[in-house]
Image (spheres, rainbow, N blue to C red):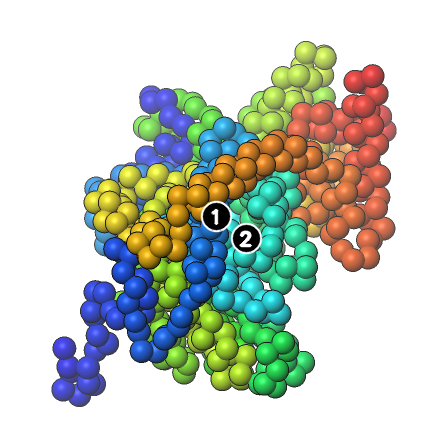
């Protein structure tokens, strides 16, 4: 057991993946000597050399596009997109190439690669540094999309994503990188990658979240417990495929569901969950599925981002509303 | 190295020829292509601009350190490149900046406090581009080079190129960095500009670093030669020499206004500071390099020249220093006083015509916010 920040856990996980498989290469802007702007790749170039930890030219389409070629040649690229808002220059490569090559080739060509994206807000940054683009990838068949929320998962999930034969968009909650610390058991068997998990059991209502909002939901559950309400919190972990088995099971017990994410509410991951849970649990639901998320505006200037981000009040407000029906 | 079949590889000279009019030692030198005379007032003006812009930068960096700004992108060392380029503009010319063009913004009359507002997170840099002929800061690397090209194509269609009327003929400048030169957008901008002969000057400040990545990671040839492959000329200028950047940019702008199409200027300079206030350059670069470039300081060399030639005396220098102090003081004061934006207004500016859905979301937010107001009472 080692106590690690989420950033350190990702670093350790990447290191392990590189040790396990010499075909794993890390690439992106500033991932070498600097160790990435968030230091997730810290020390890797020093230990694995610059053929395996590649500082690329400043070109996201180039980064992802060349990773496709490397993957076709038997390598396992792990690319870093510096910030969520800078994935769009690579969007064409991700959506039209990465996601489709397996299908197009009827399974003959595989592109096992991981596209790591630090996502979400709450760090007081300027424009394009706080976005939640997950729905755009979840809406793209051929991509798998996962989001970690804590150090132990981060350590395991990054390795599982690297080992996957499918391309994985790997979302990292940047606001938690250095602020969360937890024990990581490097020898523990990891939870399956494509599964959601109940992170706090409860009986009265269900909260579903992923990435940065998991810890907010856990805090909300703590507050609710003081007020006598028992909230179950589920960490989705995987957004594509979406694992709703624990969610459906939970809602059948609690009858109430609130989905929480930072991304814009309209056509976000929460919308899909609401639709599917309504279909599966119609007769168990005591209230409509509610969503708490970012407003349908571009991410605002940092001084008012706290209003944009789902916080305890908005989550507990939504919980109250589900009890009001 | 010449391949017997494919011919020579591009030259790999480490420090290729660059236009210089003022040496680091403050000696005036002459260049046949840019035989420009400067009046004493012009020279003093350059000095004043560079000094004030350096102060602006130092002050903003300090404000960030005091927690007043979330971030600041420093321009330390790039004053000559920006003031030279900025002062070469005609009033009708239009500029598309990145996020570090504080000196050009200064020349265009954008209040420095507006720049602070962006980095404080009060707004996203929402000055009126048409008021200053200075576009919005662009954070996504390279994107603005395409906008500049399209804008230049518009100017061309409006008949504001090659008329011979110096008040009418207009050019556009696209600023970007050496790192940006790798982006697809920048290369596509080159293709469009060349193909349509657009009146756009691509002004690259090669400060030799893209965060931690040295210039060699972006290009194997000197940047100014890239344009050759796209079919338009390129030139390298000493970016720490305000006279040279001014002269070269002025000539390039005139060429564009005359209808002779795009040009690439590579202002060869150095980022003395960190990439931004969150960066730690000790992780990737040698302090020797910084020391070496300090000797090429753009302001110091002009000061030497002014003094040695009796163009500036102590009184003038003291006056500029006092002006810099006043600017710093005003920035501190007005930065503190910048009001936070209103969340309520967010929904009003998503579209030109607000949708019913957004109005409903706004009302929902207002109701939520009101419960807090009540609780506070
Ligand atoms: C598309 C995109 N990718 C990555 C970034 C993050 N980023 C901001 S500045 C920068 C380096 C830019 O270097 P350069 O173009 O040389 O300009 P400089 O900052 O040195 O003036 C990077 C990678 C970004 N803003 N946009």
Quadrant, the N terminus of chain A: top left
Residue A33: mark in rendering: none
Q: In this view, does B71 lie above or below A312?
A: below
Question: In the rendered view, does A212 fall on the left or right side of A292?
Answer: left
Residue at 71% from the left image edge and 16% from the top image edge: A229
Residue at 24% from the left image edge and 42% from the top image edge: B287
SS state under label 2: helix
Measuring from the top left, give residue B370's x and y in whole percent: 83, 28
Do we see residue B318 in this rendering? Answer: yes
Measuring from the top left, give residue B300's x and y in whole percent: 33, 49
Task: Look at mark 1 in the image and give the residue it sits on.
Answer: B53
Q: In this view, does B109 lie above or below A239?
A: below
Chain to which mark 2 belongs: B
Question: In the rendered view, does A101 fall on the left or right side of A39?
Answer: right
Q: In this view, does B131 lie above or below A118?
A: below
SS state under label 1: helix
- Would the CB of label 2 be found within 8 Å of ligand 1? no
Q: How far apart are marks 2 and 1 (CA)?
A: 7 Å
Do we see residue A71 in this rendering? Answer: no
Task: Look at mark 2 in the image and give the residue it sits on.
Answer: B106
The residue closer to the viewer here, B35 or B131, is B35
Crowdedness near tag 2: few (<14), some (14–19) or many (≥20) residues, C-alpha within 10 Å: many
Quadrant, the C terminus of chain A: top right
Question: In the rendered view, does B284 fall on the left or right side of B256?
Answer: left
Measuring from the top left, give residue B247's x and y in whole percent: 42, 69
Crowdedness near tag 1: few (<14), some (14–19) or many (≥20) residues, C-alpha within 10 Å: many
Q: Is residue A240 above or below residue A190?
A: below
Residue at 17% from the left image edge and 88% from the top image edge: B5
């Amino acid at each position: 057991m080692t106590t690690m920040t989420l950033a350190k856990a990702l670093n350790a996980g990447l290191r392990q993946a590189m040790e396990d498989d010499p075909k794993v290469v890390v690439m992106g802007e500033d991932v070498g000597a600097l160790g990435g702007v968030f230091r997730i790749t810290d020390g890797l170039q020093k230990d694995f050399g610059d053929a395996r930890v590649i500082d690329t030219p400043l070109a996201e389409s180039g980064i992802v596009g060349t990773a496709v070629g490397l993957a076709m040649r038997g390598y396992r690229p792990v690319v870093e997109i510096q910030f969520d808002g800078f994935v769009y220059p690579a969007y064409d490569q991700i959506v039209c190439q990465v996601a489709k090559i397996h299908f197009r080739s009827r399974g003959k060509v595989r592109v096992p690669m991981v596209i790591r994206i630090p996502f979400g807000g709450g760090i007081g940054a300027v424009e394009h540094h706080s976005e939640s683009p997950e729905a755009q990838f979840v809406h793209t068949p051929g991509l798998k999309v996962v989001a970690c929320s804590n150090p132990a998962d981060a350590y395991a999930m990054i390795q599982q994503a690297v080992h996957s034969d499918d391309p994985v968009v790997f979302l990292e909650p940047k606001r938690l990188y250095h602020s969360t610390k937890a024990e990581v058991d490097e020898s523990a068997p990891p939870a399956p990658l494509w599964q959601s998990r109940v992170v706090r059991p409860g009986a009265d209502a269900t909260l579903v979240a992923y990435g940065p909002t998991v810890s907010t939901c856990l805090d909300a559950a703590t507050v609710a417990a003081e007020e006598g309400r028992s909230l179950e919190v589920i960490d989705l972990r995987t957004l594509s495929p979406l694992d709703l088995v624990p969610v459906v099971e939970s809602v059948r017990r609690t009858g109430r569901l609130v989905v929480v994410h930072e991304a814009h509410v309209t056509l976000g991951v929460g919308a899909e969950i609401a639709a599917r849970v309504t279909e599966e649990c119609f007769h168990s639901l005591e209230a409509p599925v509610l969503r708490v998320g970012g407003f349908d505006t571009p991410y605002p200037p940092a001084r008012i981002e706290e209003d944009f981000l789902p916080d305890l009040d908005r989550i507990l407000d939504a919980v109250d509303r589900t009890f009001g029906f | 190295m010449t391949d017997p079949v494919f011919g020579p590889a591009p030259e790999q000279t480490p420090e290729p020829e660059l236009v210089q009019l003022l040496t680091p030692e403050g000696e005036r030198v002459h260049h046949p292509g840019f035989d420009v005379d400067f009046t004493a007032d012009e020279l003093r003006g350059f000095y004043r601009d560079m000094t004030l812009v350096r102060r602006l930068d130092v002050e903003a960096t300090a404000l960030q350190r005091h927690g007043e700004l979330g971030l600041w992108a420093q321009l330390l060392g790039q004053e000559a490149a920006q003031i030279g380029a900025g002062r070469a503009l005609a009033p009708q010319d239009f500029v598309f900046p990145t996020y570090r063009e504080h000196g050009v913004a200064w020349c265009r009359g954008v209040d420095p406090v507006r720049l602070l507002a962006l980095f404080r997170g009060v707004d996203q840099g929402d000055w009126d581009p048409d008021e200053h002929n200075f576009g919005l800061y662009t954070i996504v690397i390279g994107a603005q080079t395409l906008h500049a090209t399209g804008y230049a194509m518009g100017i061309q269609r409006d008949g504001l190129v090659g008329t011979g009327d110096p008040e009418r003929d207009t050019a556009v400048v696209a600023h970007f960095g050496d790192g940006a030169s790798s982006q697809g957008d920048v290369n596509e901008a080159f293709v469009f500009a060349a193909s349509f002969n657009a009146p756009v000057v691509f002004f690259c400040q090669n400060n030799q670093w893209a965060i931690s990545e040295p210039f060699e990671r972006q290009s194997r040839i000197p940047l100014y030669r890239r344009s050759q492959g796209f079919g338009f000329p390129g030139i390298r200028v000493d970016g720490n020499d305000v006279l040279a950047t001014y002269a070269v940019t002025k000539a390039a702008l005139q060429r564009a206004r005359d209808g002779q199409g795009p040009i690439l200027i590579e202002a060869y300079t150095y980022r003395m500071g960190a990439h931004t206030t969150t960066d730690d350059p000790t992780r990737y670069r040698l302090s020797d390099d910084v020391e070496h470039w300090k000797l090429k300081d753009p302001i110091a060399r002009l000061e030497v020249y002014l003094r040695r030639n009796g163009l500036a005396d102590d009184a003038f220098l003291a006056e500029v220093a006092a002006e810099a102090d006043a600017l710093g003081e005003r920035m501190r004061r007005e930065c503190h006083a910048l009001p936070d934006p209103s969340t309520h207004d967010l929904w009003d500016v998503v579209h030109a015509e607000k949708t019913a859905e957004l109005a409903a979301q706004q009302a929902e937010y207002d109701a939520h916010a009101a419960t807090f107001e009540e609780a506070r009472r």
